[in-house]
Amino acid sequence: MLKDILEYQKIDVALFEIERGLINSAEFKEAHKMQQFLKQCEESLSKMEKQSAELLGFFNQALKAYDATAKRALEVEKAASTDEKAIGNFNKILDEISKLEKSINALNKNMVDISKKYDDIAKKSTAAKKAFLENRQAVEQKKKDKAGEITRLQTELKAASAKVSKDYLEKYKALRKENKVPAYVELLSKKKCGGCRMDLALNKLDKLKEKGSTIECEHCKRIVYNF
Ligand SMILES: [Zn+2]
């Protein structure tokens, strides 16, 4: 009977509001925000670790090339005091050395920059983790505070559900899943759905004239009744 599902709904709405209260609490939202931020931090840090490793590889290669070129420079320098061709070679090598120095300095600067960014994000990540844990704990505390009430309502709900017809209950649960609570709503102004407040089709309204009957709102799919 309609009366039974409405009784069931009354209890479930109270439960639903407790759930909503937790989800809409500032602490829950903050914890969620921090969780998202931590995910971003993790991604950035792992990306930077890869970049650092790559830069270090380039840096070591450049250092090796620098050492080899400096050694060659020393050898050529000995001959360069007399041999004109050797002087040309020596100058070329000096050019190479200066280019290598520049790229080593640039790589070094990049590595320092990344390292600074990494430390900055790591610090922010630590702070976010702390904030996340604090807020999650606050949400857990709120849940604990409501635990007695939740258990009482759940017991009442179970008892009430035994009286409700299967068809009514299934419809209710499907709508509840979509957060359409209350799912069973009164007819408003003799023509509107009490949930979404849209006008109902005339042929459907005819069906509602029968006492205890229900129709499905074509707009929001809630069940409309008329006493
Ligand atoms: Zn509706």
Image (tube, rainbow, N blue to C red):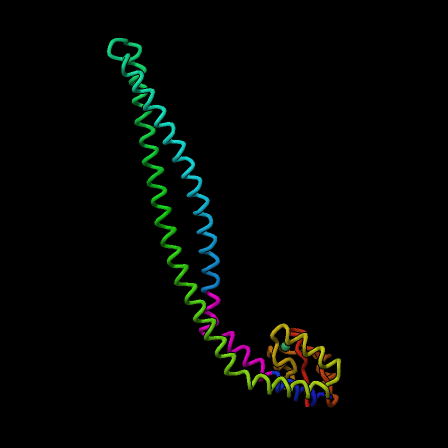
- Residue 88 is situated, as x and y percent measured from the top left of the image, at 30, 14
Say left or right for 145 vs 217. left
In the image, the segment drawn in magenta is: 13-33
Q: Is residue 187 visible?
A: no
Q: What residue sits 48% from the left and 58% below the top?
A: 39
- Judge from the rendering whether residue 80 lies leftward or rightward of residue 215; answer left or right: left
Q: Report x, y in % for residue 179.
A: 60, 74
Residue 22 vertical placement versus 211 (above, below):
above
Residue 117 in view (yes/no):
yes
Rendered view: 113 above or below 76: below
Left/right placement of residue 170 relative to residue 88 reads right
Decide which of 64, 172 is in the foreground and name it: 64
How far across and how far down the image is residue 13, in percent? 59, 83
**How many marks on residues?**
0
Q: Where is residue 203 in the image (x, y as percent from the top left)?
A: 73, 79
| Residue located at (27% from left, 14% from top) | 78
Looking at the image, is 160 positioned above or below residue 78? below
Q: Quadrant of the C terminus?
A: bottom right
The quadrant of the rendering that contains the N terminus is bottom right
Magenta stretch contains residue 124 = no
Q: Which residue is drawn at 54% across and 81% down?
A: 18
Write down which quadrant ligand 1 falls in: bottom right
